[in-house]
Amino acid sequence: RAKEEGRGQFREYTTAMDEETRGRLQLERELRIAIQKQEFEVYYQLQVNVENNKPYGIEALVRWNHPKKGILSPHAFLPAAEETGLIVKIDDWVLRTACLQTKKWHDEGFGDLVISVNISKKQFDRADFVERVKQIIEETGINPHLLSLEITENMAITQIQEAVEKLIQLKKIGVQLSLDDFGTGYSSLSQLKNIPIDTLKIDKSFIQDTNSQNQENLALVKLIIAMAKSLNFSVICEGVETEEQLHLIQTEGCHHAQGYLFSKPLNYEKCGSIMQSMNENVKVV
Ligand code: C2E
Ligand code: MG
Ligand code: MG
Ligand code: MG
């Protein structure tokens, strides 16, 4: 009997495993088809200059327009895309599309809009990564000074010699470099000094846990902004949702903000009309 029970448990266990594996294989199959059929779409989220409330830039955020499930967020498919290496093709497509569409915006009067694009570790680690970026810049005609590549702290500080070498080559092409989700990784101040980064994007968890009750997080946000500024980084606060949070980072001298307070990530047309209306609303003093 004990044996039978044991077998029963084993069967349940394998069934659960099978389901998980099946689900993952199904997702992988669908992802491959999605890449062939170009089912992805680039959404854009505004980054605002906190001094004058004008658009400073936009971040490209990938969405999967799934034939059955509708618009999917990255968390639903990026882990699988990373595991299978398919992320490299997706990132390539996102970078190219974001550059093409932003070039149109540049030509239509948003002349100094900075486009930020997320780069996965697999993409960054490719031997020909710098060459690919160069190629996409040439093909799309984007001004490299208005292109910012977002990497994470951990990408910059593992295999640091190789990574720094790559970052230096990217700087030579003229692109900007940002550290995404800053504060959640493992980089130290001394390491930060040695990598050629232009911008720190303070992770949204810091600003979102600030309120008048939470003095520690408040102090932390102030400290990170002050530190970043003293090291001459440009600073973007992610996840700004309330006027109170905006006021806080304005007071601390943060340069740019990104978050639902201004806009959620939107498709090309919608983001374009928001930027249009923001420019029209600028008061001439
Ligand atoms: P991220 O690069 O840190 O992007 C910011 C994320 O925070 C976005 O989530 C954005 O929608 C969300 N966000 C922005 N403002 C607010 C806010 O005020 N409140 C809250 N709660 N959330 C806010 P999203 O679009 O779901 O993307 C998640 C992550 O997926 C990104 O985090 C990035 O790491 C990754 N990702 C997105 N697109 C790409 C891509 O094309 N390639 C790669 N490799 N990764 C991507
Ligand atoms: Mg990002
Ligand atoms: Mg990120
Ligand atoms: Mg982030």
Image (cartoon, rainbow, N blue to C red):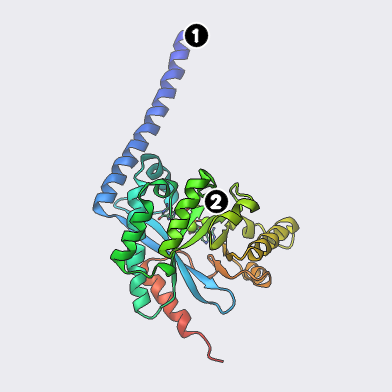
The residue at which mark 1 appears reads as 2
Return the x and y of residue 138 as percentages of the image width and height. Answer: 31, 65
Q: Amino acid at mark 1?
A: Ala
How many C-alpha atoms fall within 10 Å of the one at disc 1: few (<14), some, or many (≥20)?
few
* Residue at the (49%, 73%) spot, across then down: 56
How many C-alpha atoms fall within 10 Å of the one at disc 2: few (<14), some, or many (≥20)?
many
Q: Is residue 125 above or below residue 15?
A: below
The residue at label 1 has a CB less than 8 Å from ligand 1: no
Name the foreground residue: 221 vs 112.
Answer: 112
The residue at which mark 2 appears reads as 153
Name the foreground residue: 146 vs 75.
Answer: 146
Return the x and y of residue 43 as percentages of the image width and height. Answer: 40, 62
Tag count in the figure? 2
- The answer to whether residue 25 of the structure is visible from this angle is yes
Q: Amino acid at mark 2?
A: Glu
- The answer to whether residue 69 of the structure is visible from this angle is no
Name the foreground residue: 49 vs 43.
Answer: 49
The alpha-carbon separation of the residues under discs 2 and 1 comes to 52 Å
Q: Is residue 177 above or below residue 248?
A: above
Return the x and y of residue 67 as percentages of the image width and height. Answer: 29, 52
Q: Secondary structure at mark 2?
A: helix
Which of the 4 image quadrants contains residue 200? bottom right
Residue, far bottom: 285
Residue, far left: 37
